[in-house]
Image (cartoon, rainbow, N blue to C red):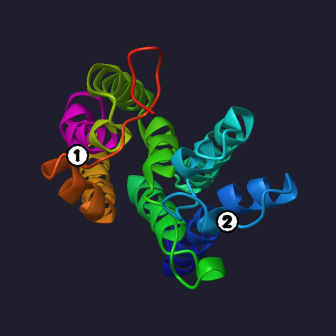
Amino acid sequence: MDFVSLLIFGLFLPFLFGSVPFGLLITASAGLGDIRNIGSGNVGATNVLRTGRKGLALATLLADAGKGAAAVIIANFLNNGNIWLSVFAAVAAVCGHVFSPWLKFKGGKGVATSIGVILALSWPTGLCAIAIWFGMAWRFRYSSLAALTAAAATPFLALMFAPWQIALALFVIAAIVVARHHENIRRLMNSTESKINLGSKANA
């Protein structure tokens, strides 16, 4: 892997893929205006869900996960057995989402994009992370707590299913996700975090 390939396919293109603010584009195209003026001001699927449009939230989730997966899949195809290209692509895609140049280097919290890159790097790890998210969300009704728990678990899960380089990438990604949830962590500690509606027992 030469330096130019690493720069283009491991850093620049994955960052560019990750930077596309699908939540903003999808809600704007649906006539809802700027999603940053709604709820938490985040461009991710959870905030899109606050518009009451579940279809738009699902579309945002799939698009954000898809862009991360696409960046890693391309790197996987081009890495010629050198896993580092895929590792760099994974981290760059998440960074692109979190620090989007189209949003003045602001962005989402990286959860959906992280799921996409994890599935592309190691699908067993990705499926376990999704299961942990759903389990925690169903039990405690906090999307942020579910995301934090899944993110923290993925590096250790990757050690069972994938090479150590992937576990290292997921450790870096987990650190980014946790850092982006600092306000949620404070609200969780203060018992002021809002819950998600998963059924009749959930709070609005």
- For the point 34% across and 24% down, the residue is 128
* Amino acid under disc 2: Val
Q: Which residues are magenta?
A: 147-162
**Circle 1 residues within 10 Å: few <14, some 14–19, many ≥20:** some
**Image-based side of 131 in relation to 19, left or right:** left
Q: Is residue 97 magenta?
A: no
Q: Position of residue 103 (x, y in %)?
A: 61, 78
- For the point 86% across and 56% down, the residue is 31
**Image-based side of 61 in relation to 88, left or right:** right
Viewer-proximal residue, 122 or 172?
A: 172
Secondary structure at badge 1 equals helix
Q: Position of residue 135 (x, y in %)?
A: 32, 20
- For the point 31% across and 36% down, the residue is 146
Q: Is residue 151 magenta?
A: yes
Q: Which mark is residue 20?
A: 2
Image: 200 above or below 105: above
Secondary structure at badge 2 equals loop
The part of the image, by quadrant, that contains residue 122 is: top left
Q: Position of residue 189 (x, y in %)?
A: 13, 51
* Amino acid under disc 1: Trp
Sooner in the amino-acid sequence: mark 2 or mark 1: 2
- Residue most toward the left? 189
The residue that label 1 is drawn on is 164
Image: 12 above or below 152: below
